[in-house]
């Protein structure tokens, strides 16, 4: 079993993948191609995804029963005591365009409004 998930990729790449896999939801492809075809499809995805993101989940002979690969993705596979987990980077504490920390919330804001704007602390 193979699953490929695309985000922000060209429509032509989606059309290429539909030759071998079923598109069960926009950008989500599933099928059972041979290992050779799966590797060729993943090479196509990496080559033609431009600035888009891609995630490949494939069946493997591991404790979990599967493994995955990422391309242009913020989350990276990490081995943790024999299990492959996706490592999510910590949220940024500075604003990327200004390089400054966000302003602290006003004192008269409710706690719910502060959580919506600034996240949990």
Image (cartoon, rainbow, N blue to C red):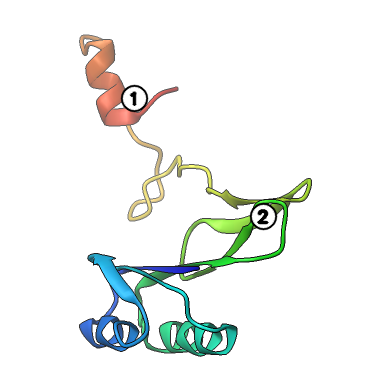
31 or 5: which is nearer to us?
A: 31
Residue under the point 41% across and 50% down: 99
The number of numbered badges drawn on the structure is 2
Task: Kindly tell me whether residue 106 is visible in this rendering.
Answer: no
Which element type, helix, strand or loop, lies under badge 1?
loop
Q: Where is residue 11 in the image (x, y as percent from the top left)?
A: 21, 82
Near-viewer residue (99 or 54):
54
The image position of residue 42, as x and y in percent, is 49, 82
Q: Can residue 12 be seen in this view?
A: yes
Mark nearest the camera among 2 and 1 is 2
State the SS at label 2: strand
How packed mark 1 is, by other alpha carbons closer than 10 Å (few <14, some 14-19, many 20 or more), is: few
Which residue matches tag 1? 104
Q: How far apart are marks 2 and 1 (CA)?
A: 34 Å
Precedes in sequence: disc 2 or disc 1 = 2
What is the quadrant of residue 44 in the picture?
A: bottom left
Residue drawn 72% across the image and 52% down it: 63
- Eyeballing the image, is 34 above or below 105? below
Report whether 15 appears left or right of 65. Answer: left
Label 2 sits on residue:
78
Going 31% across and 22% down the picture, which residue do you hit?
115
Q: Where is residue 54 in the image (x, y as percent from the top left)?
A: 42, 70
- Labelled disc at residue 33: none
Give the image location of residue 100, x and y in percent: 39, 43
């Amino acid at each position: 079993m193979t699953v490929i998930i695309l985000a922000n990729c060209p429509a032509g790449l989606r059309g290429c993948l539909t030759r071998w896999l079923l598109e069960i939801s926009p950008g989500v492809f599933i099928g059972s191609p041979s290992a050779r075809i799966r590797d060729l499809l993943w090479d196509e995805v990496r080559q033609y995804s431009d600035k888009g993101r891609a995630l490949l989940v494939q069946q493997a002979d591991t404790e979990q029963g599967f493994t995955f690969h990422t391309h242009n993705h913020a989350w990276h596979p990490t081995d943790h005591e024999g299990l492959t987990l996706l490592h999510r980077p910590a949220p940024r504490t500075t604003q990327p365009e200004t390089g400054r920390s966000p302003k602290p919330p006003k004192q008269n804001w409710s706690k719910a409004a502060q959580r919506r704007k600034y996240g949990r602390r």
